[in-house]
Amino acid sequence: MMADSSASFNAPANGSEARGDAYRYVWSHGDKVDGLERALLCVHGITRNRHDFSFVANRLAPQFDVHAVDLLGHGDSDSLNGAPYTREIFLAQLQHLMALIGRRKIGFLGSSYGGLMGIRLAAMEDSPIGCLVLNDASAALQGDFFRQTARRISFRPVLPSLQSAEGWMRLVFRNSGPLTDDVFRDLALRGTRRLPQGGYELTYDPQIAGLWIGNQLTETEHWTPWRRIRCPVLVVRGKKSSVLTDEGLEAMRVANPAIDVIEIDGVGHFPHLMSDQQADPVRRWLLEHL
């Protein structure tokens, strides 16, 4: 069973208007077990939240100290109240949490945008990341993808009922693999909040769209850190993914030939990791490499 904790940290100096402000973030974790050396940090995609990892955390709990975090502007963590979201703020938040976890080496599992954060962190000098799992995260993103993503996430609908919220989750995860009705219901409950005037909204700040426009991202910015990574890397790819394409995966292999790859048939972007079929290969790899 996962419990929740919260912590506050100061935004980094290059955080523009957020500079120096303290923000509170929330993460889930298992009970502390003496002698359990393996720790794993799980980081969600750009409009998602920590609850995406509830299933995989329970599967890993006997062997791993699992931590799943809400990035700022997501889930139960603070939003930036109009200050711009930047990659540096998210990286500072994750470094703060890794220091709290306090292990010499930490496994990192990142879905989509969370995986891009993992690439940056694993490439840093003296990084505590001992192995990296990228869930359909690509270093080979193109400019059109940034623009399309910005348009998509800047629109946050008001959903009139939990039933409609469940329908929205079915749309979000339509390419991620089969899920049960109970899972979709849980995703709707954990991924929305009730509005005072009625209806429900998704638990992310649409201002995060600013990450994907202007000078925040370029088509080549992930290649330099990708080439610097020296820890073991597993890339999990939906075989039909439109984000981590065949060509993108091959380019990542050329730049970092030592990576391991698991491809999931019949799945696009991104594998949900909420079933034994999807989560067990990741668990086995982590047991070997962390």
Image: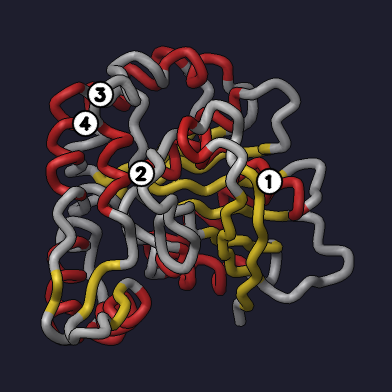
| Residue annotated with mark 3 | 214
Residue depicted at x 31% and y 27%: 249
| Residue annotated with mark 2 | 112
- The image quadrant that residue 13 belongs to is top right
In what element is the residue under mark 3?
Answer: loop
What is the crowding at mark 4: few (fewer than 14 residues within 10 Å), some, or many (at least 20)?
A: many
Q: Nearer the viewer, mark 2 or mark 1?
A: 1
In what element is the residue under mark 1?
Answer: helix
- Quadrant including the C terminus: top right
Q: Nearer the viewer, mark 3 or mark 1?
A: 3
**Percent position of residue 230, x then y:** 63, 22
Of marks 4 and 2, which one's residue comes earlier in the chain? 2
Separation of disc 3 and disc 1 at Cα?
27 Å
Q: Nearer the viewer, mark 2 or mark 3?
A: 3
Which residue is nearer to you in this view: 111 or 71? Answer: 71
Mark 3 touches mark 1? (CB < 8 Å): no
Separation of disc 2 and disc 3 at Cα?
20 Å
| Residue annotated with mark 1 | 96
Residue depicted at x 32% and y 45%: 208
Of marks 3 and 1, which one's residue comes earlier in the chain? 1
Which residue is nearer to you in this view: 232 or 53? Answer: 53
* Residue 146: mark: 4
In the image, what residue type sits under mark 2? Ser
